[in-house]
Image (cartoon, grey):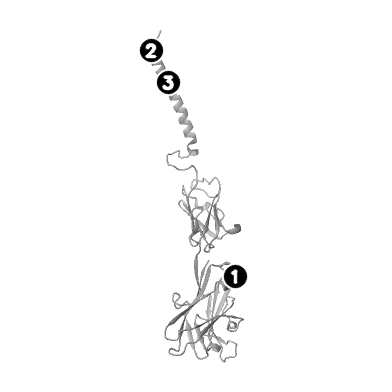
Amino acid sequence: MLDNTGMTSILRWSLTVVGAVWLAACGNVKSERTGDLPDAAGTGELPGLHVTETLPANGVAGADVMAPIVVTFNKPLSAVTVSTTSATISGPGGTSIPATVAATDRQLTITPSQRLPGNAFLTATVTTQVQDVAGEALTTDFSWTFTTGYGTTKLYGAQEFTPRDIPPDGVADVFVGGTPPPRILFIKKGTEDRSVVEFDISQFPTDVMTATLSFDSTTLDPGGGSTRIAVYIFDGNGVADLSDFSRTQTLFAEDFGANDANHKTQTYDVTAQIENARTRGIHYLGFLFLAEDTTDRFSLIASTDNPNTGAPQLTVTY
C-alpha cells in the first residue's frame, strides 16, 4: 500500500508526462501554421504578400495630377511580374489611363504617360500577377480609389512664325527669316507682316477651369503714338503655312501695344475658346497678331529666345 508520499510522486509524474505531451502537440500545430497565422513571428504583419501603403491613399481628395502613384508592399517584388497589365489606372467610365510601371525593392510605381485628369474619380489596381522575389503572389487583386485636384499646364507655340506679304496683295509670299520658318515673331504694318502662333491643345478636355493667352510686345518705333495690336483666332493644323496669313479668322481681342522701348504684357481669357475648340475635336488652336496701324511695327518674343519672359503662351488649369 502506498503512503501519501508515494501517491504524490506518482501524481506529479503523471501530470508532467501529460503536460509534456500536450505542449509538444501544441508546438507541432503552431509549426505547421506559422505561415498562415497573423503575426506568427511577432512582427505585427499579415501573412503572405500584401500592400502596406499607397500614395495617394485610399479615399484622398485633391490628389496631385502630376505625381506618380506608388504602392508599397511588405516584401521585395519580382520586377518581371510587374507590367502595365498587372498595375493599372482607370478614370471616369472605366477609361484606361496609359502609364508605365516599374518595381524597385518593395515599391511599385505607376507613372501616367500624361498628367492625370483634373477633378476626376480614379481607380488604381494591382493584380494577382504581382509576385515577390520568392514567387509568392497577391492572393486577390488590390484596388483603391482617389479623386484628383486641378493642375496647371503652360504651353508655348508648337508653331511660331511670321508670313510676309510684299507687295501687299493679301497673299503672303515668304516667311520672315527664311524657310523653314524660324521662331521669329514680327508685326509690321497690318498689310505686311503678321505673326502666327499655333498651340497643340489636344491634351485638354472639353471643359477646363481657366485658360489665358498672354504675350509681350515691344515697339520698334519708340516715342510714337500707341497702336492697337489685333489678335485673331482660328483652327490651326500644326503646320507653318503661308496661307495662315489670310486663313479664315475671327477677331478675338484688340489692345494697345507698347509705345516706348519696353515690354507690354497682354493677357486674355480664352477659356470659352479652348472649350469650344476641344468640343469640335480641334487639336491645334491658332492666334494671329497684327498691328492695326499701317505705320507701326512691333516684335514679339519667341519662345526659343526667352521662354520665361513674354513669349506667347497658353496657361490652362484643368
Residue 235 lies in quadrant: bottom right
- Residue 61 position (above or below residue 254): above
> Residue 278 sits in which quadrant?
bottom right
Q: From the image, tell me which residue sits under label 2.
A: 6
Residue in the foreground of this view, choosing between 14 and 62: 62
First along the sequence among labels 1 and 3: 3
Question: In the rendered image of this protein, does residue 117 appear above or below residue 199?
Answer: above
Which label is found at residue 15?
3
Q: Is 93 displayed left or right of 30 in the figure?
A: right
Q: Specify the farthest residue to the right.
A: 280
- Mark 2, residues whose alpha carbon is within 10 Å: few (<14), some, or many (≥20)? few
Marks 1 and 3, Cα distance to the nearest angstrom?
85 Å
Give the mark nearer the N terminus: 2 vs 3: 2
Which label number is shown at residue 278? Answer: 1
Is there any visible trace of residue 95 in the rendered image? no
Q: Residue, x 47% and y 31% (percent of image)?
A: 28
- What's the residue type where badge 3 is placed? Leu
Label 1 CA crowd tier, 10 Å (few <14, some 14–19, many 20+): many
**The residue tagged with tag 1: helix, strand or loop?**
helix
Q: Quadrant of the N terminus?
A: top left
Q: Position of residue 304 (x, y in %)?
A: 47, 77
| Crowd rating for badge 3 (residues with CA inside 10 Å; few <14, some 14–19, many 20+) | few
Q: Return the mark for residue 139.
A: none
For marks 2 and 1, the one nearer the N-term is 2
Structural distance between the alpha carbons of marks 2 and 3: 14 Å
Mark 2 residue type: Gly
